[in-house]
Image (cartoon, rainbow, N blue to C red):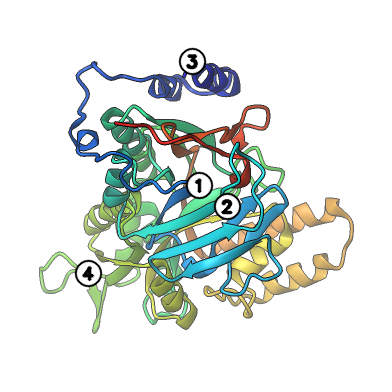
């Protein structure tokens, strides 16, 4: 256990904020410290443990079982029903469980074939409970508070915060073809009315950074300076709405203009606590300016169907943008793959003109021009970046799961599965 703590300190101690540095304490057992142990004490001997099997917790709201990948020493593989060409066999493939068996296993002392089970849960609360009970061996959570709660209940579940990929931004996306949301002025008003900084401070416990009007972080060469970052300004939001003819004519607190009323569904990932909290904050913030938000949660599969068909109004969405011209065009405008399908002549001209240029120096200025257009038309409300994903491991069962030098999780076929502990 001391080795794990030392490993964490060397990997993170020199470059994390003081608030996050306290996470190193989670890697040490705290039995006897008065922390709750009730759930853990419900365990039966070796409950939920199958020899040679790693159980990974997933969420139906965040993960699509048809789009799962497994990282092995030979590379990263997409799991499909037919996997004859891959180094594993698919045993189960359904919305509740995907199970694979590796063709060969050389990582342990025994010759057991290794199985990896991806188990899907309807919400994070059930996933957290299953980790506490050691029915799940590994899972990833979005907030420090969730990880801390699991560790307090079961100190044998250790927490390693790993930095999220650069330019992975939480944002609001609008249906640009909606009869009301097609208004640039309305989208600007909504963006000004959302208190993004308060979300970072309270929901992320300052483990994040407010976005500045662009999907790229400020230290990225693709970051476009001088754009409107839509700082929280509800007064300006109300002025924009009133200037554009929106008023509360019937006194119900919701603005209307003619027969149109400012009431929208907000789609988000089902069972993901952080997304639920963000949706709730957005609902409260927008109610202050006379906009009604109705949060509606969906599984990942159902959400993707709605986005693809255009059957949505506003959606809460997290996405990582590569540093490329293609990343912007494909996500926002490419009619073949973009559910947003932003139609703008200058946007398309700039992309196709500079895409032909092989000089990287020309591509970056072009990407910044594309961002300026997205900002001017408020195609999205970029809210914040999270600093960390919180990886939880059951060390009663697992070993050799973390690469200290690379500061990353090792491939699954390098993990050690410890012998069962007799309770």
Viewer-nearest residue: 244 or 145: 145
Quote the CA–CA distance across marks 4 and 2.
62 Å
Residue on which the image places disc 3: 2
Q: Residue furthest right?
A: 358
Give the mark nearest the N terminus, 4 or 2.
2
Q: Where is residue 196 in the image (x, y as percent from the top left)?
A: 38, 45
Viewer-nearest residue: 406 or 187: 406
Q: Do the residues bearing badges 4 and 2 touch, measured as CB atoms within 8 Å?
A: no
Residue on which the image places disc 4: 255
Give the mark nearest the N terminus, 2 or 3.
3
Q: Where is residue 166 in the image (x, y as percent from the top left)?
A: 61, 44
Residue on which the image places disc 1: 52
Is residue 375 in sight in this rendering?
Answer: no
Tell me the crowding category of disc 3: few under 14, some 14 to 19, or many 20 or more residues within 10 angstroms, Cα based. few
Image depth: mark 3 or mark 4 in front? 3
For label 1, the SS is: loop
Viewer-nearest residue: 55 or 120: 55
Tally of marks: 4
Give the mark nearest the N terminus, 3 or 4.
3
Quote the CA–CA distance across marks 4 and 1.
60 Å
In the image, is 26 to the left or to the right of 133?
Answer: right
Numbered tag placed on residue 113 in the rendering: 2
Q: Quadrant of the C terminus?
A: top left
Image point (62%, 80%), residue name? 335
Is residue 28 in sight in this rendering?
Answer: yes
Q: In this view, does 267 lie above or below 278?
A: below
Image point (72%, 60%), residue name? 325
């Amino acid at each position: 256990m001391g080795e794990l703590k030392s490993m964490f300190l060397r990997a993170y101690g020199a470059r994390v904020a003081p608030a996050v540095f306290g996470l190193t304490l989670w890697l040490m057992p705290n039995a006897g410290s008065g922390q709750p142990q009730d759930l853990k004490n419900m365990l039966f001997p070796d409950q939920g443990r199958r020899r040679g099997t790693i159980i990974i917790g997933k969420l139906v709201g965040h993960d699509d079982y048809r789009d799962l990948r497994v990282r092995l020493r030979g590379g990263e593989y997409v799991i499909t029903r037919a996997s004859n060409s891959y180094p594993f066999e698919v045993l189960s493939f359904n919305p509740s469980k995907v199970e694979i068996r590796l063709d060969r296993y050389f990582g342990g002392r025994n010759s057991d074939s290794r199985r990896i089970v991806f188990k899907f849960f309807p919400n994070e609360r059930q996933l957290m409970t299953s980790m506490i009970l050691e029915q799940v061996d590994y899972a990833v959570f979005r907030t420090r508070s969730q990880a801390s709660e699991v560790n307090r209940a079961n100190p044998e579940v250790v927490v390693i915060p790993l930095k999220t990929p650069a330019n992975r931004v939480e944002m609001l996306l609008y249906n640009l073809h909606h009869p009301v949301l097609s208004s640039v002025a309305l989208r600007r008003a909504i963006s000004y009315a959302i208190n993004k900084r308060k979300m970072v401070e309270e929901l992320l416990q300052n483990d994040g950074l407010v976005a500045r009007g662009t999907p790229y972080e400020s230290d990225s060469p693709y970051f476009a300076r001088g754009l409107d970052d839509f700082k929280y300004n509800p007064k300006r939001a109300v002025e924009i709405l009133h200037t554009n003819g929106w008023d509360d004519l019937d006194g119900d607190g919701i603005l209307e203009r003619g027969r149109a009323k400012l009431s929208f569904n907000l789609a988000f990932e089902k069972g993901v606590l952080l997304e639920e909290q963000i949706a709730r904050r957005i609902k409260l913030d927008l109610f202050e300016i006379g906009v009604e938000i109705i949060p509606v949660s969906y599984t990942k599969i159902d959400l993707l169907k709605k986005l693809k068909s255009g059957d949505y109004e506003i959606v809460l969405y997290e996405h990582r943008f590569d540093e490329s011209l293609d990343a912007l065009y494909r996500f926002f405008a490419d009619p073949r793959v973009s559910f947003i399908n932003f139609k703008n002549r200058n946007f398309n001209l700039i992309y196709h003109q500079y895409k032909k240029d092989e000089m990287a120096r020309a591509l970056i200025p072009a990407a910044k021009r594309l961002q300026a257009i997205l900002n001017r038309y408020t195609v999205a409300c970029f809210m914040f970046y999270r600093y960390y994903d919180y990886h939880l491991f059951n060390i009663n069962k697992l070993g050799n799961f973390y690469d200290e030098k690379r500061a990353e999780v090792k491939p699954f076929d390098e993990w050690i599965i410890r012998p069962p502990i007799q309770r």
